[in-house]
Image (spheres, rainbow, N blue to C red):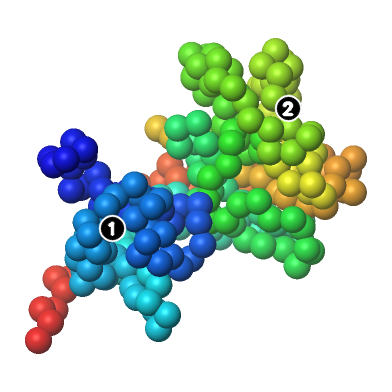
Amino acid sequence: MRGDGRTVTSKTLALLAAYEQGPAALSLSELAARADVPLPTAHRLVGELVEWGALERDTQGRYTVGLRLWEVAQNAGRHLRDTARPYLQDLFSLTHETAHIAIREGDEALYIDRIYGSTRVPRASRVGGRLPLHATAVGKVLLAFEEEWVREAYLTHRLEPATRHTHVNPGRLAAELRKVRDEGYATTSEEVREGSCSIAVPVRLDPHPAAIGLVMLSTQGTVMTRHLPALRGVAHRIEVAAARPQPSVLRLPRRASR
């Protein structure tokens, strides 16, 4: 550790984390500022990341996430994504609405996979993206079916509004979560993006529960519960598929570069 007490590893991770919310390409100075790393240090670390393949430098001298980092990241949540993908495709085929699956990561819903519909619904998430639990239908499902202490801890935090429709009153949200547990599904209407609504149900997996949901235009909000049979049927199929033993895979060693 040097200077500010941060390790080289923490500074490197901060440089990579700069891409979580920002644009796809960043200049060296933008990276240094976002990671709160001195420019000379950023120059050295970014150079090493480029050499390894975690970052790539474009023709304008800006840096983007490299293919090697993308390749490594594909293994995150791979079992759940690969298991759920054919059933998520079935859900899309049955409803013709944007379908997705998410898990809880801290105080956010992390989107593992998504299949986009052709309707131009305002988009709030992407695969690998995160959204607040209290503003999304999948997030409310994840929170509702968590242990009580998790819900209580979440409700003690300040709930930020994504839109003027977001439910941020802790008492109201607690009552809504009780209703979600009783009824087995959650809905939102323009809570994360104006013009869209969503509905979701739990996928009871061990050890990490998930939720699948649909996003559609807010004009369909009054009739979106018609998709509950499809959502619940697909959730059950994912649960059964995930419980099956996974076949072992023989991995061949990578050929050494010459």
Q: Viewer-proximal residue, 246 or 48?
A: 48
- 127 relative to 224 in the view: left or right: left
In the image, residue 130 above or below residue 122: above
**In the image, what residue occupies the spot 40% across and 72% down?**
62
**Quick one: SS at disc 1?**
helix
**In the image, what residue occupies the spot 42% across and 80% down?**
60
Specify the quadrant of the image occupied by residue 30.
bottom left
**Quick one: SS at disc 2?**
loop
**In the image, what residue occupies the spot 61% across and 44% down?**
212
**Of pointers 1 and 2, the one earlier in the residue sequence:** 1
Q: Position of residue 164 (x, y in %)?
A: 78, 35
- Residue 163: tell me if it is visible: yes
Give the residue at mark 1. 39
Disc number placed over residue 253 in the picture, else none:
none
Specify the quadrant of the image occupied by residue 6.
top left
Q: Is the N terminus in the top left, top right, bottom left or bottom right quadrant? A: top left
Give the residue at mark 2. 167
Q: Amino acid at mark 1?
A: Leu
Q: Is the C terminus in the top left, top right, bottom left or bottom right quadrant? A: bottom left
- Residue 145: tell me if it is visible: no
Nearer to us: label 1 or label 2: 1
Q: Viewer-proximal residue, 42 or 13?
A: 42
Sort mark 1 into few (<14), some (14-19) or many (20+) by Cα contacts within 10 Å: some
- 185 relative to 253 in the view: left or right: right
Q: Are marks 1 and 2 in contact (CB under 8 Å)?
A: no
Sort mark 2 into few (<14), some (14-19) or many (20+) by Cα contacts within 10 Å: many
Q: Amino acid at mark 2?
A: His
**In the image, what residue occupies the spot 77% across and 57% down?**
121
Q: Viewer-proximal residue, 255 or 162?
A: 162
Residues under labels 1 and 2: Cα distance?
41 Å
